[in-house]
Amino acid sequence: MGPDTAGLWEGVYQAPNDDAPRAALGQYLSAAGDPRGRFIALQLQSGGLAKAQQAEARALLKAHAAQWLAAVDGVLVARSVTWERGFPVAGALNYGRSSQDRDRLVGCRAFATLRSLDLGKSNVVQPRAWCERFLWGTPLRGLETLLGLPRALLAPLSRSHPPWALQRISCPAEGGGGPAGIEHEREEIGELRQSFGVGGGLPALVDVTLSYAHGGRSTAPYAWLWETGQGRRLRVLRLNADPSALPQWHAQLSACVDVGLQELELFTASSLTLHRTSAGWTRLTGVLAPATRGRSADRIERERLDLREVLATLGGALTSIDVDGFSG
């Protein structure tokens, strides 16, 4: 890569929201016979692509995506990557690579075009120390969605400067068993409560997935959210909790004033979402997970019965119920 080419790539990474540096790079690459130039030009076209151009872009991506992802050394799972305006905008970390391989990517400029990144794999939590090095040492401040974040890093993100553009953060459920685990979670909550109260590092955050093991069905580990400015600005809260927690959450949310929350999702294998309407928390949607390997028909039926009991507890508080796999 010559000095002129390096400068054009750097121009894209320094201004990832600007089309002009991308167009300049695309023109240069096209003149040099590099197919990436044509791909960039196609994806920059406004007004959408004709079918033939869409097919051309797909063919270019199929033929060259692996080479183009070499800039991030294959640390992103190729099939997880979404491309826009000629560059990756979303992807998930490749667990097939070693920690040493991932360490080499700390500081990589090619990550600057990402708007969504998944650090996790199911409920596997990446080591905090590595995530901290990666997040703070790599140009990722343009991220809007961050999945798989170790829960302990949410407080430092909230205090960080300059602020992040993050709108959605998902923290996987982590173990918290035994007295030591419970105490650790309480310490985390105390730090996060303070950071959400005074931190300015996440001004755009509106959607959080956050779960604590020691609370069980209780809403207590989360009640502090509505006492902080950051918590009151949330629009969506997602928790790893079973439907039996629904009545307690409905009661707490109905008592809250001056909060922006519009949706509360409780999920395990199934998912239930309470929606706030003009009349209050009156709408429930969701999906009961179907029978699969490890989930027998008897278990599904027990879950339906449990949900009926939960809804009976709520009485007439819900005026709209639309849960796939549940017939009332």
Image (spheres, rainbow, N blue to C red):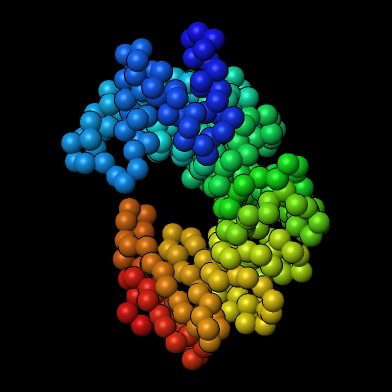
For the C terminus, give its image quadrant. bottom left
Which quarter of the picture shows residue 49? top left
Q: Is residue 257 left or right of residue 239?
A: right
Give x and y (percent) for residue 81. 41, 36
Identify the residue shown where x is 38% and y is 22%. 27
Identify the residue shown where x is 63% and y is 24%. 107
Q: Is residue 80 visible?
A: no
Looking at the image, which residue sits at the far bottom?
316
Looking at the image, which residue sits at the far top?
2
Which quarter of the picture shows residue 194? bottom right
Give x and y (percent) for residue 176. 68, 52
Q: Is residue 89 visible?
A: yes
- When the figure is inspected, residue 297 is found, relative to residue 144, above or below; the finding is below
> Which sits in the foreground, 271 or 109?
109
Q: Is residue 129 left or right of residue 244?
A: right
Identify the residue shown where x is 32% and y is 62%. 290
The mark tally for this picture is 0
> Which sits in the foreground, 13 or 233?
13
- When the figure is inspected, residue 111 is found, relative to residue 253, above or below; the finding is above
Give x and y (percent) for residue 185. 73, 54
> Which sits in the foreground, 195 or 68?
68
Q: Is residue 309 left or right of residue 326?
A: right
Which quarter of the picture shows residue 85? top left
Give x and y (percent) for residue 65. 35, 25
